[in-house]
Image (spheres, helix red, strand yellow):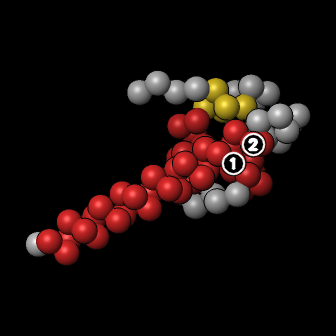
Amino acid sequence: MNSVIVCHCVVVRDHEIRTEVRLGADTVEAVGARCGAGTVCGGCREAVAETIIDEVTRGRSLADDGVAATARH
């Protein structure tokens, strides 16, 4: 899996942000507190937010698929 650096100041990759979201971080501030992303210059805060939104949306999609699969059985 390819991973990109989202926060260059503290070298945080997108997969690290996604992991923190799956563990409950749902804001840029919460992600920053857990892994440091967005806490130095702030230039990546928008990208961190986009990654959070993408992961939350992905999680909901997977949950919806699971509910649909369960309903079919």
Q: Residue at x 79, y 27 (%)?
A: 9
* Circle 1 SS class: helix
From the top left corner, tell me how far across and down residue 6 is, in percent.
Answer: 67, 31
Q: How many marks?
A: 2
Marker disc for residue 46: 2
- Asked whether the residues under the numbered discs 1 and 2 touch, taking CB atoms below 8 Å apart as contact, a structural biologist would say yes
Looking at the image, the residue that sits furthest to the right is 41
Q: Is residue 70 left or right of residue 22?
A: left
Where the N terminus falls, by quadrant?
top left
Q: Residue at x 44, y 62 (%)?
A: 60
From the top left corner, tell me how far across and down residue 29 is, in percent.
Answer: 77, 54
Residue 57 seen? yes
Marker disc for residue 49: 1
Neighbour tally class for label 1: few under 14, some 14-19, many 20 plus, Cα within 10 Å: some
From the top left corner, tell me how far across and down residue 3 is, in percent.
Answer: 52, 27
Residue 36 seen? no
